[in-house]
Image (cartoon, rainbow, N blue to C red):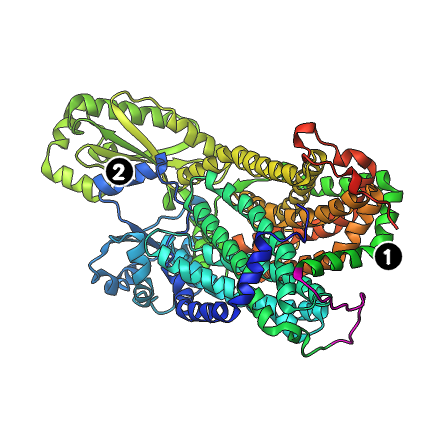
């Protein structure tokens, strides 16, 4: 993709924007005022974490339980702690139950029971049972309704004197995530924007020019969140979406505006009118950021291959905010530039430096374009540091390529030992009540008591049917004999070790049916087996056990394996099965687009491979930090021994398009010089010289903006901030200033080779001249 001054769509767009600049600015002000309030309310409308694998066996099994056994839609775990009172004492346990009296008055209250502690914890010294106790409260609310009432519900939960109570479970975690999401957005803006202002002031040297990129970023985020408020009223969206919108909106919005403002100042220095400067800016930088937006969209759209609402929501939020950022940068920003004109340089904070003599050209727009280009072509480039660096690198291409490749490949080594799992409350830091309660609960209570593996059985005939009950008995016997299962509990245990005929007769008694239904063990045609696994929830052994359970054959019964461990397995399987399609689509489409843009096979292949290298290296560091705990305390991260299974794909899709943008911008300028001179080495040095300062500034701002999310609360955003900032840093340093010139030197004219069908129809050999 070569920048050109031949008047085209973006030139005429710039002309049109300049003509209607006042109307455009007023229109955006009205739109912003109308959507600002809705934008602030969007996080409250997002009640889904996005992890539910709809249509999976675990989800279908849960629906069977809720429909046929009246399983509650919401469960809360109340964890009690005391240093003075023995919580295993019957009187203390009764006081805890009595403290729930206000909850029992709620129509949604469906019962409460103690969660029994495991033998190891009960036999510890001192016994954990004397210090901790836990009650599970069942509510007949779905997720949305429970979340809506949770603040009021939480006020009704009071600990007895001498005790503390922590409320955890799906609804409390979701509530805390909503609160964390809102605080994270504020924290990221308060940390990132001041630093970005400083960088922009140093880049532009004037207050007015530095303010415009921030304007574009903030407007893009506000408009996107305001529009998504209405989408969230129709569709269920993940509560992680506002964070990705804020991160991407500020990052790409500021970056795009940086390119536009920089090019406008350059064009204004050599054109007779503000109108022509705006048009020329749009024809060059405006066109570039449009294709940059397309590159980011390609990466984000890769998330659609994974059938989870989390990815759909992040894709929707990301694509929308990038789209709006491109629109704002190509309409509102040039309109403001048209209004400002030379006042873009108002309020300077640094001494003025002029690297190119200011030239104002009179005549028609077309004459101005031609004269401006020839004037620049005649200027002999100064041998500044970027050129010297490029020529230094090209003197030692083999050594530097091996060195940098070695560093990047070494950084990828931790990926060999990556362990992936699906977190729950671990996405929050311990300062949140739901996370603290979760940690206490899982430290002392067995996972099978909190979230047992459930095998749901649905028969075509009533359970009292003799043949059906016989098949259920055989199933329980098979389950009891499986390795890795410590205990199986079902309605058959309540019926007692009687003969088949006796159990059939008992099942026909109305009072027995009612008792089994109240205990959530059996209904008319549905029953559930509660499996106590010998393995921890997230281990490979436990996953293998679930897969083995799903292979059981009971001809006359429908079987569903569900529970938290089964949900986690289904989520991970959906992600891992879709990963090849994500990689193939994103890299394949990007390669094809770059191939058509550069009219080369090696350049797009090299760009894609180097992008994968920088991504792999950054993901390796993410594994070291979040799985192995490197620098975890400094970054306020709770190392869990695994990486959130959703993160690698999210980081890949978000980072790929953004980091590819810098590569495309650099290669485009190198290609422009090569088509003019035919000299590969000169073109490489000149391309790095012309793009070095601008790309470095843009990369620095992006690193600052997304890097601030490392210091927020939600784990996914921390990891995304770390992965994205690392990938951009690697891309803007090791890749762009070392590997690109090294490989350009090594490959020489092969960089520009293409089969005949890919070459442009009109040869450009006659246009090439030797470098001055």
Crowding near pointer 2: few (<14 within 10 Å), some, many (20+)?
many
Q: Residue furthest front?
A: 363
Q: Residue at x 80, y 35 (%)?
A: 749
Which residue is at the far bottom?
347
Q: Nearer the viewer, residue 706 or 418?
A: 706
**Does the CB distance between marks 2 and 1 fall below 8 Å?**
no
What residue span does the magenta drawing correspond to? 350-365
Describe the element under mark 1 as helix, strand or loop: loop
Does residue 12 appear in this view? yes
Q: Give how far across and how far down residue 424 sits, in percent.
A: 45, 50
> Which residue is located at x 81 percent, y 42 percent?
768
**Residue 643 in view:** no
Q: Is residue 309 above or below residue 557?
A: below
Q: Which secondary structure, mark 2?
A: helix
For marks 2 and 1, give the one nearer the viewer. Answer: 1
Q: Main structural element of the magenta stretch: helix, strand or loop?
A: loop
Q: Quadrant of residue 433?
A: bottom left
Distance from the alpha carbon under mark 2 to that under mark 1: 76 Å
Please say whether residue 741 is one of the residues in the magenta stretch.
no
**718 vs 391, nearest the viewer:** 391
Q: Relative to residue 748, is residue 608 drawn left or right?
A: left
The dot on residue 64 is 2
The reply, left or right, for residue 537 in relation to residue 598 is left
**Coordinates of residue 232 in the picture (x, y in percent):** 36, 56
Q: Earlier in the sequence, mark 2 or mark 1?
A: 2
Q: Is residue 357 magenta?
A: yes
Mark 1 = which residue?
A: 380
Give the side of residue 70 with respect to residue 413, left or right: left
Q: Which residue shows up at 66% across the image and 45% down it?
A: 1
The location of residue 566, given as percent across then percent down, is 40, 37
Number of marks present in the image shown: 2
Q: Residues within 10 Å of mark 1 (few under 14, many from 20)?
A: few
């Amino acid at each position: 993709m070569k920048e050109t001054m031949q008047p085209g769509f973006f030139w005429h767009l710039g002309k049109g924007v300049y003509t209607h600049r006042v109307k455009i600015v007023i229109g955006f002000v009205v739109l912003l005022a109308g959507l600002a309030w809705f934008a602030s309310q969007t996080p409250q409308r997002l009640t889904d974490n996005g992890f539910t694998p709809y249509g999976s066996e675990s989800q279908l099994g849960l629906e069977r339980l809720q429909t046929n056994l009246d399983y509650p839609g919401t469960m809360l775990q109340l964890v009690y702690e005391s240093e003075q009172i023995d919580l295993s004492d019957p009187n203390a346990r009764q006081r805890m139950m009595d403290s729930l009296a206000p909850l029992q008055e709620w129509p949604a209250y469906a019962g409460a029971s103690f969660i029994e502690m495991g033998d190891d914890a009960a036999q510890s010294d001192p016994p954990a049972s004397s210090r901790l106790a836990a009650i599970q409260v069942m509510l007949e609310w779905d997720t949305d309704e429970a979340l809506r009432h949770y603040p009021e519900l939480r006020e009704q939960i009071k600990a007895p004197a001498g005790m503390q109570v922590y409320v955890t479970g799906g609804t409390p975690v979701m509530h805390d995530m909503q609160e964390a999401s809102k605080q994270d957005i504020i924290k990221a803006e308060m940390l990132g924007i001041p630093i970005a202002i400083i960088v922009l002031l140093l880049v532009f040297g004037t207050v007015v020019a530095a303010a415009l990129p921030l304007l574009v970023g903030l407007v893009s985020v506000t408009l996107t969140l305001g529009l998504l408020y209405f989408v969230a009223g129709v569709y269920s969206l993940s509560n992680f979406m506002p964070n990705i919108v804020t991160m991407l909106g500020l990052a790409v919005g500021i970056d795009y505006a940086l390119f536009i403002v920089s090019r406008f100042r350059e064009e204004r220095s050599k054109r007779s009118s503000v109108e022509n400067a705006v048009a020329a800016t749009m024809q060059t930088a405006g066109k570039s950021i449009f294709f940059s937006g397309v590159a980011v969209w390609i990466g984000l759209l890769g998330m659609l291959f994974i059938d989870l609402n989390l990815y759909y929501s992040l894709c929707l939020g990301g694509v929308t905010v990038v789209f709006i950022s491109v629109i704002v940068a190509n309409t509102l920003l040039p309109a403001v530039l048209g209004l400002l004109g030379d006042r873009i340089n108002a309020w300077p904070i640094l001494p003025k430096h002029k690297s190119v003599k200011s030239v104002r050209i009179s005549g028609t727009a077309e004459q101005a374009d031609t004269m401006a280009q020839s004037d620049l072509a005649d200027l002999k480039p100064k041998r500044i540091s970027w050129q010297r660096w490029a020529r230094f690198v090209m003197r030692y291409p083999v050594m530097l390529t091996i060195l940098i490749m070695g560093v990047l490949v070494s950084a990828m080594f931790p990926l060999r030992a990556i362990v992936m799992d699906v977190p729950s409350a671990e996405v929050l830091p311990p300062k949140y009540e739901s996370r603290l309660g979760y940690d206490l609960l899982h430290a002392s209570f067995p996972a099978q008591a909190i979230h047992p593996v459930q095998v749901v059985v649905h028969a075509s005939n009533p359970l009292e049917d003799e043949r059906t009950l016989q098949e259920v008995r055989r199933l329980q016997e098979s389950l009891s004999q499986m390795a890795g299962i410590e205990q199986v509990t079902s309605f058959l245990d309540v019926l007692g070790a009687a003969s088949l005929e006796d159990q059939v007769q008992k099942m026909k008694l109305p009072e027995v049916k009612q008792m089994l239904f109240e205990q959530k063990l059996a209904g008319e045609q549905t029953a559930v087996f509660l499996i106590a696994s010998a393995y921890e929830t997230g281990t490979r052994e436990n996953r293998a056990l679930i897969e083995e359970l799903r292979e059981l054959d009971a001809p006359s019964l429908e079987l569903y394996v569900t529970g938290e461990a089964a949900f986690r397995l289904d989520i991970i399987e959906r992600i891992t099965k879709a990963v090849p399609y994500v990689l193939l689509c994103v890299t394949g489409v990007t390669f094809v687009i770059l191939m058509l843009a550069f009219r080369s096979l090696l350049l797009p292949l090299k760009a894609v491979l180097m992008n994968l290298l920088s991504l792999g290296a950054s993901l390796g560091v993410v594994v070291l930090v979040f799985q192995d705990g490197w620098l975890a305390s400094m970054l306020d991260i709770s190392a869990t021994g695994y990486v959130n299974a959703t993160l690698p794909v999210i980081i890949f899709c978000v980072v790929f398009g953004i980091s590819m943008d810098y590569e495309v911008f650099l290669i485009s300028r190198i290609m422009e010089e090569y088509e003019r001179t035919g000299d590969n080495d000169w073109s490489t040095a000149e391309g790095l010289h012309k793009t070095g300062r601008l790309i470095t500034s843009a990369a620095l701002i992006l690193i600052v903006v997304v890097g601030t999310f490392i210091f927020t609360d939600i784990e996914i955003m921390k990891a995304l901030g770390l992965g994205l900032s690392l990938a951009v840093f690697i891309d803007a340093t090791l890749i762009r200033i070392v590997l690109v010139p090294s490989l350009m030197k090594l490959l020489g004219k092969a960089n520009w080779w293409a089969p005949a069908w890919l070459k442009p129809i009109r040869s450009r050999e006659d246009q090439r001249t030797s470098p001055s």
